[in-house]
């Protein structure tokens, strides 16, 4: 890679549920390498981590928050509702997000930040960069069917990963000249191989056609992974932590995801030549 020279650095943090904890490890490694962003764009899990970082929290502080979240703790966020447009109302999640982020607006953040969501009615990408940050993050993490859409600006918004899984091009639109993009989507081929490996060699089920649930899961993995690969083409440095073994809701494995992210970033940094631009410290 040629030396881009002095450049405005943007971080594009992708969606991936519990795998998004790997972003924290990436941030840790980048800071240790002396790299800091001028702006951030995030989708879903990447939106949450990005918002916390843009607010001024250090990676170690975000790591502590991630390690406090586990399956037992997740139960308190389950405010079930009549399943009209989602199983969860999301009010308890909003309360928790507010306790973490505070009642801040985008204008209060220490870094320019854009949160990606999807208009569920039109399929349009919606870039959120104004108003309360917590509302934007809540929209971006709203998995369709699981959480009811968020109504903002006359739109019903859900997970931004439907249209922009790793917002590298969004960073470009924000003015970034050098984009570091992080994908935490699993490779469907690796997931399939892992499933086969855990079966017994005498298990006849491995010779059968995949069932409906498996087919639907693979469709989701394939489409998400292919979109990630297209999104990464807009970046200058792509970091892809090997989180294939971590499930979408394996929040109890945050420590493992963080370590994987940190190692992936270190390996990527060894192979590239970073620009001399970017912030050199945090306030």
Image (cartoon, grey):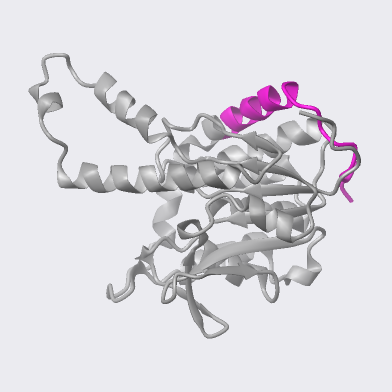
| Residue 254 vertical placement versus 242 (above, below) | below
Residue 178: horizontal and vertical position, in percent?
Answer: 78, 44
Left or right: residue 1 compared with residue 70: right
Residue 112: horizontal and vertical position, in percent?
Answer: 78, 61
Left or right: residue 77 compared with residue 207: right
* Residue 6 image-quadrant placement: top right
| Residue 204 vertical placement versus 234 (above, below) | above
The residue lying furthest to the front in this view is 2
Q: At x 42% / y 60%, what residue is drawn? A: 143
Q: At x 33% / y 25%, what residue is drawn? A: 194
Left or right: residue 88 compared with residue 15: left
Task: Magenta stretch: give its range.
Answer: 258-283
* Residue 172 image-quadrant placement: bottom right
Residue 36 within the segment the image draws in magenta: no
Image quarter (top left, top right, bottom left or bottom right) of the N terminus: top right
Q: Which of 80 and 170 is in front in this view?
A: 170
Residue 75: horizontal and vertical position, in percent?
Answer: 39, 55
**In this view of the protein, can residue 93 be seen by the observer?**
yes
Q: Which of 203 and 5 is in front in this view?
A: 5
The residue lying furthest to the top in this view is 201
Q: Which of 277 and 93 is in front in this view?
A: 277
| Residue 195 vertical placement versus 18 (above, below) | above
Left or right: residue 132 compared with residue 78: right
Q: At x 15% / y 25%, what residue is drawn? A: 206
Q: At x 31% / y 46%, what residue is drawn? A: 219
């Amino acid at each position: 890679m040629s030396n881009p020279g002095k450049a405005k650095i943007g971080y594009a943090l992708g969606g991936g549920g519990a795998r998004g904890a790997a972003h924290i490890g990436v941030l840790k490694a980048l800071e240790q390498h002396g790299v800091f962003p001028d702006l951030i764009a995030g989708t879903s899990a990447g939106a949450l981590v990005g918002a916390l970082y843009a607010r001024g929290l250090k990676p170690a502080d975000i790591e502590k928050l991630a390690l406090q979240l586990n399956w037992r703790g997740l139960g308190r966020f389950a405010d079930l509702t009549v399943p009209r447009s989602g199983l969860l109302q999301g009010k308890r999640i909003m309360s928790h997000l507010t306790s973490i982020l505070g009642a801040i607006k985008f204008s209060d953040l220490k870094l320019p930040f854009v949160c990606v969501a999807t208009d569920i009615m039109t399929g349009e990408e919606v870039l959120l960069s104004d108003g309360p940050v917590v509302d934007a993050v809540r929209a971006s993490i709203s998995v369709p069917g699981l959480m009811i859409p968020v109504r903002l600006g006359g739109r019903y918004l859900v997970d931004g990963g439907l249209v922009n899984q790793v917002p590298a091009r969004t960073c470009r639109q924000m003015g970034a000249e050098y984009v570091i993009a992080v994908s935490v989507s699993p490779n469907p081929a690796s997931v399939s191989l892992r499933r086969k490996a855990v079966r017994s060699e005498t298990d006849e089920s491995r010779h059968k056609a995949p069932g409906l649930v498996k087919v639907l899961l693979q469709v989701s993995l394939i489409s998400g992974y292919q979109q990630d690969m297209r999104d990464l083409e807009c970046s200058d440095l792509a970091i892809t932590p090997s989180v294939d073994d971590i499930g979408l809701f394996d929040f109890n494995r945050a420590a493992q995801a963080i370590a994987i992210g940190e190692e992936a970033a270190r390996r990527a940094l060894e192979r590239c030549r970073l620009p001399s631009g970017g912030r050199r410290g945090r306030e």
